[in-house]
Image (tube, rainbow, N blue to C red):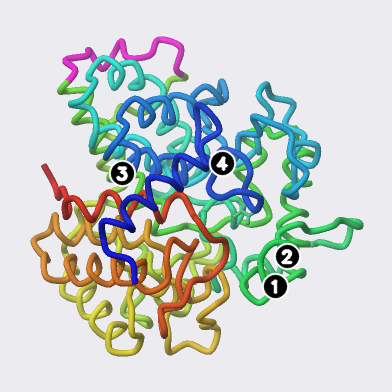
């Protein structure tokens, strides 16, 4: 049985082994490139023992930012055959090659956490963060709806969540053609999305290619869903960016003269704060994603239903805590990615049930910042116990705590390092 000290040294070795110089892969083989939100959570882990690497990791991601402000979800810094779909399929024509969609914008919040260590480097990132947030505002629904929308399940980072089943079912995949998945060579197929989902994931990539990845056209993707997780993460990131701009004493008006005309940060924050209540579903008694074309909410809660406090929204704190308590009674460990009482719940299948420590981290940060410290602490302890039980897996079965997906996973190691040293930072 490993001690916590052994696990801490294992976590550091995982990050060292998974680094490729200036960035860290999520895990060897299954995900051999730089992934956007993985990389930012991993920077939090690096910051616990190698601050230089934490900053390098963040800066490297922004080296791949598009002129529009979009920060891609994958950066293909090298050629690797163990992953599909690679840069040839995405065909974005960028240097470095990248995917054509984004991922949850956690970067500004991570920069805020470590800014005191190197304020100059934090200040240099501000225009990049500002441009990325404006891109979400303009091209992912915030200006129009007051909430963030996704154009591909991969953009949510929660690929096969049951929420996406219905909106994905209308995507025409008849022209996708033949292809070979690589993920199921490396991980048991029962832990991964089905082929019919992959067909549609690829059809949506082909839609982007056909539209030459134009932001305007892609915003109208055949798959468009308003996501409470991205919205909460963006709202928190906007607040953290506003704090950083203030702390750096930068004149906001001159932060980035190359930006398109867009709303100032205070307006963007207000728009998101006012919009968040649209996620509330009285049927599910939870914050749920919705289809902006029909207004219909998803039918059940997900781990994203617990993220409003992370965005500073505590008007329904008691309902959020009650949902967490109910789940705690139904599963041995928390937080399951999907409602455990629903028919679509699958304890081992990727985002249809398993627990993800990075999501636990943001949920607990949010609860702690709204003074629900007991709930936050319950999540932290459950997360540390999962690693003690099974090691540094990609995710965990919420019923028995067994590891799910890839092993030696960077972001799980990073959250262990962050949480074993200190609990939450809360709202500062
Ligand atoms: C994958 O390939 O499974 C990723 O989650 C896509 O980003």
State whether label 3 is within 8 Å of ligand 1. no
Label 3 or label 1, whichever lies nearer to me, is 1
Residue 110's place in the image compared with 327, above or below, is above
Label 3 or label 2, whichever lies nearer to me, is 2
Q: Secondary structure at mark 4?
A: loop
Q: Earlier in the sequence, mark 4 or mark 1?
A: 4
Rate crowding at label 3 as few (under 14), some (14 to 19) or many (20 or more) other CA atoms within 10 Å: many
Label 3 or label 4, whichever lies nearer to me, is 4
Please state the horizontal and vertical placement of residue 418, each as a whole percent of the image: 26, 49
Q: Earlier in the sequence, mark 2 or mark 4?
A: 4
User: Seen in the image, is 340 located left or right of residue 198?
Assistant: left
Question: Gap in Å between the C-alphas at discs 3 and 1?
Answer: 41 Å
- Which stretch appears magenta? 248-259
Residue 243's place in the image compared with 269, above or below, is above
Residue drawn 74% across the image and 34% down it: 79
Question: Gap in Å between the C-alphas at discs 3 and 2?
Answer: 41 Å
Q: Earlier in the sequence, mark 1 or mark 2?
A: 2
Residue drawn 16% across the image and 67% down it: 377
Q: Secondary structure at mark 3?
A: helix
- What residue does disc 1 label? 189
Residue 52's place in the image compared with 171, above or below, is above
Q: What's the mark number on residue 248?
A: none
Between 78 and 148, the one nearer to me in the picture? 78
Between 70 and 329, the one nearer to me in the picture? 329
- What residue does disc 3 label? 271
Question: Does the CB distance between marks 1 and 2 fall below 8 Å?
Answer: yes
Rate crowding at label 2 as few (under 14), some (14 to 19) or many (20 or more) other CA atoms within 10 Å: some
- What residue does disc 4 label? 73
């Amino acid at each position: 049985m490993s001690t916590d000290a052994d696990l801490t040294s294992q976590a550091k070795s995982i990050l060292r082994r998974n680094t490729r110089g200036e960035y860290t892969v999520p895990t060897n083989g299954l995900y051999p490139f730089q992934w956007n939100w993985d990389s930012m959570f991993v920077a939090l882990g690096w910051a616990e023992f190698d601050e230089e690497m934490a900053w390098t990791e963040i800066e490297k991601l922004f080296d791949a930012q598009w002129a529009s402000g979009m920060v891609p979800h994958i950066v293909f810094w090298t050629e690797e055959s163990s992953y599909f779909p690679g840069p040839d399929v995405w065909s974005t024509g960028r240097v470095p090659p990248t995917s054509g969609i984004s991922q949850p914008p956690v970067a500004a919040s991570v920069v805020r956490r470590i800014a005191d260590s190197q304020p100059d480097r934090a200040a240099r990132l501000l225009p990049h963060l500002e441009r990325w947030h404006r891109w979400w505002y303009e091209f992912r629904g915030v200006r129009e709806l007051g909430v963030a929308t996704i154009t591909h399940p991969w953009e949510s980072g929660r690929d096969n969540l049951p929420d996406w089943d219905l909106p994905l079912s209308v995507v025409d995949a008849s022209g996708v053609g033949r292809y070979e998945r690589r993920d199921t060579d490396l991980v048991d197929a029962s832990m991964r999305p089905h082929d019919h989902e992959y067909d549609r994931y690829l059809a949506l990539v082909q839609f982007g290619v056909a539209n030459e990845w134009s932001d305007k056209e892609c915003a109208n993707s055949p798959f468009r869903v308003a996501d409470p997780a991205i919205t909460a993460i963006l709202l928190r990131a906007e607040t953290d960016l506003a704090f950083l701009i203030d702390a750096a004493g930068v004149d906001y008006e001159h932060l980035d003269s190359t930006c398109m005309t867009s709303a100032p940060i205070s307006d963007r924050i207000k728009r998101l704060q006012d919009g968040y209540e649209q996620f509330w579903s009285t049927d599910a008694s939870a914050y749920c994603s919705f289809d902006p074309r029909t207004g219909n909410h998803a039918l059940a809660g997900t781990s994203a239903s617990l993220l409003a406090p992370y965005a500073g929204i505590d008007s329904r704190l008691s309902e959020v805590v009650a949902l967490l308590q109910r789940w705690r009674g139904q599963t041995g460990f928390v937080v399951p990615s999907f409602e455990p009482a629903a028919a679509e719940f699958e304890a081992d299948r990727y985002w249809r049930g398993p627990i993800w420590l990075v999501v636990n981290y943001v949920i607990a940060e949010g609860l702690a910042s709204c003074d629900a410290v007991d709930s936050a602490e319950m999540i932290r302890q459950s997360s540390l116990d999962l690693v003690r039980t099974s090691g540094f897996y990609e995710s965990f079965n919420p019923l028995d705590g067994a590891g799910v997906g890839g092993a030696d996973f960077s972001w799980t190691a990073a959250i262990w390092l962050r949480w074993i040293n200190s609990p939450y930072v809360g709202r500062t």
